[in-house]
Structures are given as structure tokens and as C-alpha cells.
Amino acid sequence: MLKFILNNQEVSTTLPTGTVLLDYIRYDQHLKGTKIGCREGDCGACTVLVGELTGAQLRYRSFTSCLTPLGNLQGKHVVTVEGLNQKGLNPIQQAIVDESATQCGFCTPGFVMSLAGFCLSEKEATCQNAVAAVDGNICRCTGYKSIERAAARVAHLLEERNGEEPTTFVAQRQILPDYFAGIKPRLRALAAEARLNGRVPDGVPQFVGGGTDLYVQKHETMRELTAQFLFDQPSLRGITREGNRCVIGGAATVTDLAESTVLREFFPEFRSFLRLVSSTPIRNMATVAGNFVNASPIGDLTIMFLALNAQLVLSDGEMARQMALREFYQGYKQLVKTPQESITAIWFELPDAHTKFNFEKVSKRTHLDIASVNSACHLTVSDGFITAASLSAGGVGPTPRLLPKASTYLVGREISEEIILESVALAQLEIAPISDARGTETYKRLLLSQLIKAHFLTLFPQLNATKLLR
């Protein structure tokens, strides 16, 4: 039986664990404040908060409930908009009213939940961070400037927090209901019970990480599917430094990457690249291994880690083996793995002071969109000469691509506009884009050329941009 706290009440259910949280909230619990919109994680109307204990810390993150299976909620705290109710409007809701930041009201609960998640985070109380918290919410009629003003007022509510634990602060200041202050011991009690995710179903299950793409592709079939949920397995979480390696658990999320002190130390710009990956709620849910196994030709994380020469650890529960990510894809959605295997870890060599890394992406929208073409560049440079190079590209073939000819050409050469243009020409021989909804073949070839040039202009600003982009 699945148990978790829903708002201020402990609940249990025997529904299939593949049931999405949105349906459970609305049809079993009759909490209709959480809206049904796109059912693809794009609109944010169904946003909820999910709180979990990580060590001694209670951490809340926004999730799109339309893509969240019940199997990923064992022992957690789920908060819907009804769970924020007080005697009157809470200060977040009041800010939205005061700034006329709602019109038809359909999207408003999602905005309220995302801003509540910001209040429960430890992020600095700035308007920029408050606005970033709602990057997964779409409004069709109000206009975003009034929503931005409301977000700024919410940020102002947190200015006196001064390091105080978020749940305590918001409860004491009546920003959110009092019961938030007592959730931590209640979750500890739930954690003492048997964990659902430790049970392995009979037969060969469908492995589910965050489920952010599986539930878009197979919404109806996932409910009854025999699934093994990997999202909460402690052995699959975490990002650590082991010697000269960065080791990432298969169930680590995109948000975990963004918050990793290891990645921040060695790749200061990595967090800015990850902001281009979908939206805050999806980043909170999507796992690294899930992105790789999904095998999308334009998977952002796949393209980044191809350039980093990432290695995979695959396990069937009894035996483990290792292989390079670049060898993982045989064809469109065809993987070098058995149905019994899952990715338990990913690792790559940490860079030295001579290493440079960059990621570029072109999409119709800056956020919450898949790429037309994306690319990553990983270089080692000494005294102006390139001693190692890896270029990768997505959206230019049936699989995520490493570009070995263009990469090999760069090694041993002094950085100049001429060698960059030659590597661009070689890259064109390694790709096979097709015309589709995201652009024509000609357009995608042009995009990749421009993205490779953008890598070098970003990493080596002394280069002549006019000469490169002519």
C-alpha cells in the first residue's frame, strides 16, 4: 500500500502505482483546484509541491502532477493549492490579487504553487529567482508583467529570512499554513515504514525514473504497466567526486546537477546551460539516466555528456558492466542494453585548468522547448593549442551524435578562425539531418555550423566574429 501526506492529511491508496498524481488528486480526493491542462508538463496548470526528507533537510520542489506517477510519492508530502488555504487569502494569493495577476484564473493555482515552492526553497529572496520559479507556468490571458510584479512582492516577503529554515519561517510569518512546521517529524515516521520502491515486481518491468517523457508518450498504458520505480532509490541518487571522477547516480535529476557543488566547482557555467533544459518542475523530476535511455536525438543532457566522454554503468541487478555513452545508441531509439538492465551511474573525468566546455541550443522558445539543433564542445587548450577536443550535436541525425572527424581535426592545432571553419566543414560530412516540424535539412545544417562557431566565440572572445560569421 502506498502512503504519503496530502496537504495536512496522511493518505493511503491501493491504486496502480502507475496512476498519475493529477488523476488521484482530482478524481479520488476531489481536490479540483489542481487543473487539467496539456497533460504533457508544458502548461503548469497542474503544478503541485512535493516535499521529501534528504538526510536532515526537508526539501520541497514543484512537480507537474500530470506526469508524476503515484509510485514516486511513497513517504513524501504532496501539497495542492487547497493545502495553502488559511482563513483568508495567503500572502502569495494576495499579491496576485493586488497586482491584477489573474484573469480567467485557470492557470492561477499553478502560479501560486510555484511561488509557494520558491518560498519553501533556500534560494535568495530576489525578484529574478521568484520569476524563475514560475518558468514552467503558462498564462494565456493575463499578461506576464502583472505576474512578475506579484512575484516581486512574494520575494519581498522573504527578505528577512536570514538563513532560517524555510518551513519554520513561512509558518511563523503566516505566509503558508502552520502545519508546514510539523511536517518533518511526520515524514520521519512514514520513512520508518517499508518503502514501496524497494520491492521489485515480478517479470521484466518497465523502469521508470522521473517519467517526464514516458507519461507523454504512453499516458494511458503507463497506469497498468508493471513498473519498477527508480526515482527514490538511495543508491541511484547523489553526485560525488571520487578521485578525479565525477560520479552521478542514474536517478539524479537535472535540478540535482544544477545544485551540485562538484559541477559548480569544475564547470561554473553548467547551471546556466541547464536553465535551457525544459522548466523548473520538469528539471525537478527528470533524471539523467532517463534522458539517456529516452534516446531522443535532441536530448540536451545526452549532448552535454557525449562531449564530456561520459561512461555508463549498467546493471541487471546481479551483474554490472560499463560502456561509453557514445557507444550506447545503435539507431533511432535503439540501445545497447537488455530489457533487464538500467543505468545505475554515470561518470566522467573531471577537467583541469586547461579545460573549456560550452553548450548551445536553438529552439522556438528559450525555455520549456525541445531543440531544433543543440551542440556541446569540450576542449583542452595549452599555450593556444588544442590538445583534446570533443564536439557533439543533436537534431542532425537519428541518434545523438559525437562528431569524431571534426573533433580529431582540431587536436594539435593552434586556435584560429581558419581551423574552426575547417572543423565546421568536416562536421557537415558527419551529419544527416532531415526536414521536419523543427526545420528543414538546410536550416539544421546552418544551425549546427553557427553553433560550433558560437562555442569558439564564447570560449575565445578574442576571435574575429566577423570573419567567422561571414
Image: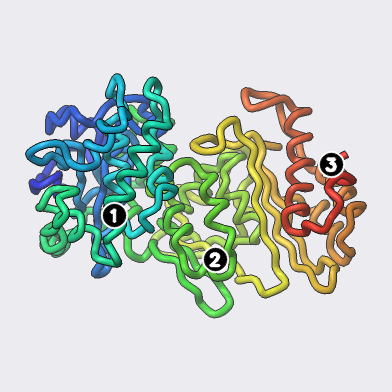
Task: Residue 218: tell me if it is visible.
Answer: no
How far apart marks 1 and 2 lie (CA) works out to 38 Å
Disc number for residue 158: 1
Q: Earlier in the sequence, mark 1 or mark 2?
A: 1
Q: Which residue is at the front of the view, 261 or 214?
A: 261
- Camera-nearest label, 3 or 1: 1
Q: Which residue is at the front of the view, 177 or 13?
A: 177
x 20%, y 59%: residue = 169
Residue ID for mark 3: 469
Question: Quarter of the image holding residue 86?
Answer: top left
Q: Earlier in the sequence, mark 3 or mark 1?
A: 1
Q: Which residue is at the front of the view, 410 or 109?
A: 109
Measured as percent of width and height from the top left, residue 416 is found at: 89, 57
Secondary structure under the numbered disc 2 in the rendered image: strand
Callout 3, which amino acid? Leu
Residue ID for mark 2: 347
Callout 2, which amino acid? Trp
x 77%, y 54%: residue = 456
Secondary structure under the numbered disc 3 in the rendered image: loop
How far apart marks 3 and 1 lie (CA) works out to 46 Å
x 38%, y 40%: residue = 134
Determine whether, in the image, residue 212 is placed left or right of residue 361.
left
